[in-house]
Image (spheres, grey):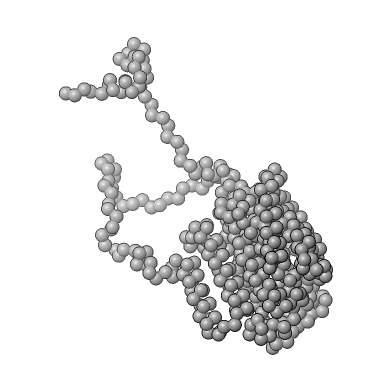
Amino acid sequence: MREYFLTLLVTAAVTYLLTPLVRQVAIRAGAMHEARDRDVHVVPIPLLGGLAMYLGLAAGLFAASQMYPLKEVLAGTGMIQGLLLAGGLIVVIGVIDDRWGMNALSKLAGQVAAGAILVASGCELAWLPMPGGGTFTPDSDQAMVLTILVVVATINAVNFIDGLDGLAAGIVGIGAVSFYLYYYHLTHVLRLSSEAVPALAAAILAGICLGFLPHNLYPARIFMGDTGSMLLGLMLAYVPISSITSLDFRTLNGTVNRFPELLPLLLPTTIMVIPYADMLMAVIRRTRAGRSPFAPDRRHLHHRLLDIGHSHRLSVLIMYLWAAVFSALIVWFSTVRMPLFVFAVITFAAVVALLVMSMPRLRWWQRDRRRPAPAGAPSAVPATAVPAGVASGPPRPYEPAPPLPHLPAPERLAARAPAPHPPAPHAPNVPGGPGAGLKVSDQVAAERPGPS
């Protein structure tokens, strides 16, 4: 574990130290994310955070290649070449999109090309488990199509959840830690040395997220942009695919869990359930409305948490907890032998607790506080007295303020600010008059009537 931990630290340190430099580059290059109607920030934020992530990836791969026994593990694989080439292509596409913009089809073509590079490096879905206990072994063309499909889906799933400060990096980091714990367990408990590759990839991915998060938590000083979200999605897809390539599920029978033929697919699906579910709902929602599946909107899971009334930080924390619960339960189920009834009870309790935390309407002990008073009941708030000269009558209906013109974010804030009150006029000091030679305060005191 020491070699994995050192690799994680090197990756995190390089990513953390280079992110401020990348931020300055983004500002000078004009790669700024302007505030939009569906965004939660109101000032421009620098993009291109994925550049620091990619440099952290390169540093982590280099550090791992210099340490024994990881050096021998990497020697027989195309992991370094595949991740650097595919990740480099993704970063180039992301930089172009973050700075100048790119249409959805061009980005999709680049994502497909990145998936093809991974296939060429030897990372592909060589087999799939079947419900009857057998396996489906696709031919080379089928394996390439399936691998590219998983890569593209995961890239876009991570991109869809990148809507709040720290959300995407945190959820991907939780998934990476879960992957690492599971594959490290296979490597050192079952002595499956082939699983050292996905374990190393998961450790590097966790280091990337750990190094970038301090700069991206609310209020974020830099965004990862499409450069970073697509790179994280590529890495997140590489980890389980590289595992299935070298894993024989028959070696798991009776040692790790009760369902070894389902675990290689159940684990990544459960760990990535939040980004996959959000992406699936977004695609269905947009296509039913006659829009493109890639058309942006403000109805993602994190936006709905904000609409419920949660703060920015609490919404992100709730999403973290959901990801941690799903990931921890499936890894625990995979590595610890326990009665299925106990596992089901623990899962049910965790889900109920998170539902109550996520949805205030389910908190039955607070319903009496939120229940409106019946008609005719005395109000607990004392009525305010109507000043003399003000006509009393029924309250006027609410009239919304006129919409503000389309202005950049700083101007919108200035337009919303109340206008300053003009200074109170004071009497002029007429030469030779009764107030001549006196200050304004002395004039006011002189004009006050004396005691009668």
Question: Which residue is farthest bottom?
Answer: 132
Q: Can residue 111 be seen?
A: yes
Q: Nearer the viewer, residue 58 or 381?
A: 58
Residue 313 appears left or right of 185: left
Q: Quadrant of the N terminus?
A: bottom right
How many marks do you count on the picture? 0
Image coordinates for residue 35, horizontal then vertical, percent: 59, 50
Name the residue located 27 percent from the left edge and 46 percent from the top edge.
386
Image coordinates for residue 368, horizontal then vertical, percent: 34, 67
In the rendered view, tell whether residue 20 sits above or below residue 110.
above
Name the residue located 68 percent from the left edge and 72 percent from the top edge.
184
Residue 137 appears left or right of 311: right
Q: Nearer the viewer, residue 403 or 433?
A: 433
Image coordinates for residue 161, horizontal then vertical, percent: 61, 62
Residue 256 appears left or right of 403: right
Q: Nearer the viewer, residue 295 or 66?
A: 66
Q: Can residue 113 be seen?
A: no
Which of the 4 image quadrants contains residue 13?
bottom right
